Image (cartoon, rainbow, N blue to C red):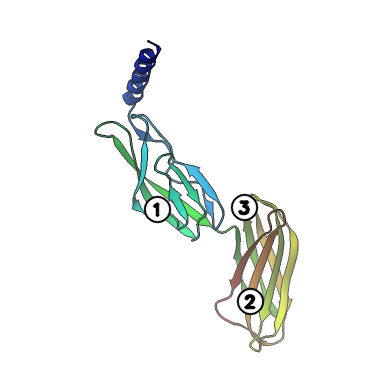
């Protein structure tokens, strides 16, 4: 008798569930992933008749990531930077199954980003410019930043140097640099090294001017 009652209640529950249309509720733009870092987010749906099944039907996931067909969990450690667009279909357990599709976008970004704020340029007696930084991780960085100008015979001159604790999930809008230089043709290099002692991680980012800068 108890088993019969449980079966009736389960049938009522399933009927109520089917009464709601199947729908994917996850936003089209997924949380950003960090290159080589563990990532996990769950695609969700409501309505239809559980259990539901998830399938990648178009586009591609970032290399190193997978979609679990049962749970809808997207996980892994991406190995390629970029914007990835893909379509996913969810099916319920009706016969025939009801299905819904949605396109998603997932951006894979660098943990440490260095960009020119002001592109290096020749001044009256040398070279000047600035960089901006972003820490996209959940860890504080022990950051070393050095900018050098290397002339045509390989001699390097320091334009700027910084060493500081770079807080998690923050940006540094601008770090200026400049120096007086002898006459020559210079390529400017900006190198950032971020260490996370807690997990022995090291992140690197680098910039270089595309054309030599001639000082007079």
Q: Is residue 2 left or right of residue 176?
A: left
First reached walking from the N terminus: tag 2 or tag 1: 1
Q: Is residue 210 above or below residue 196?
A: below
Q: Is residue 2 above or below residue 168?
A: above
- Mark 3 touching mark 2, by CB under 8 A? no
Pinpoint residue 45: horizontal percent, then vertical percent.
Answer: 40, 35
Q: Nearer the viewer, mark 3 or mark 2?
A: 3
The crowd level at tag 1 (other Cα within 10 Å; few <14, some 14-19, many 20+) is some
Is residue 116 visible from the viewing direction of this image?
Answer: yes
Quarter of the rendering containing residue 44: top left
- SS at badge 1: strand
Residue at figure coordinates x 67%, y 73% from the top left: 128
> Residue under circle 1?
85
Q: Is residue 113 left or right of residue 14?
A: right
> Residue under circle 3?
137
Distance between mark 3 and mark 1 Cα atoms? 23 Å
Task: Find the residue positioned furthest to the top.
Answer: 1
The crowd level at tag 3 (other Cα within 10 Å; few <14, some 14-19, many 20+) is some
Asked whether 14 or 112 is in front, the reply is 14
Pinpoint residue 101: horizontal percent, then vertical percent.
Answer: 33, 42
Pinpoint residue 151: horizontal percent, then vertical percent.
Answer: 66, 85
Asked whether 120 or 38 is in front, the reply is 38
Residue at figure coordinates x 34%, y 15% from the top left: 8
- SS at badge 2: strand
Is residue 125 visible from the viewing direction of this image?
Answer: no
> Residue under circle 2?
188
Distance between mark 3 and mark 2 Cα atoms? 27 Å
Quadrant into which the N terminus falls = top left
């Amino acid at each position: 008798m108890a088993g019969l009652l449980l079966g009736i209640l389960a049938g009522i529950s399933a009927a109520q569930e089917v009464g709601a249309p199947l729908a994917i509720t996850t936003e089209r733009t997924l949380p950003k992933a960090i290159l080589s870092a563990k990532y996990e987010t769950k695609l969700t749906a409501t309505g239809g008749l559980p259990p539901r099944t998830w399938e990648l039907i178009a586009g591609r996931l970032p290399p190193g990531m997978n979609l679990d067909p049962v749970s809808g969990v997207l996980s892994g450690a991406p190995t390629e930077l970029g914007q990835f667009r893909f379509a996913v279909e969810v099916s319920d357990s009706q016969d025939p199954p009801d299905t819904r599709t949605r396109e998603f976008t997932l951006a894979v970004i660098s943990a440490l980003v260095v960009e020119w704020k002001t592109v290096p340029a020749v001044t009256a007696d040398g070279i000047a410019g600035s960089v901006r930084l972003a820490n996209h991780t959940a860890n504080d960085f022990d950051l070393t930043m050095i900018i050098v100008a290397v002339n045509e015979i390989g001699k390097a001159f320091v334009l700027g140097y910084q060493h500081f604790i770079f807080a998690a999930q923050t940006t540094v809008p601008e770090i200026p640099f400049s120096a007086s230089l002898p006459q020559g043709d210079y390529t400017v290099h900006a190198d950032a090294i971020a260490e996370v002692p807690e997990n022995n991680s090291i992140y690197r980012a680098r910039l270089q001017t595309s054309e030599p800068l001639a000082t007079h």
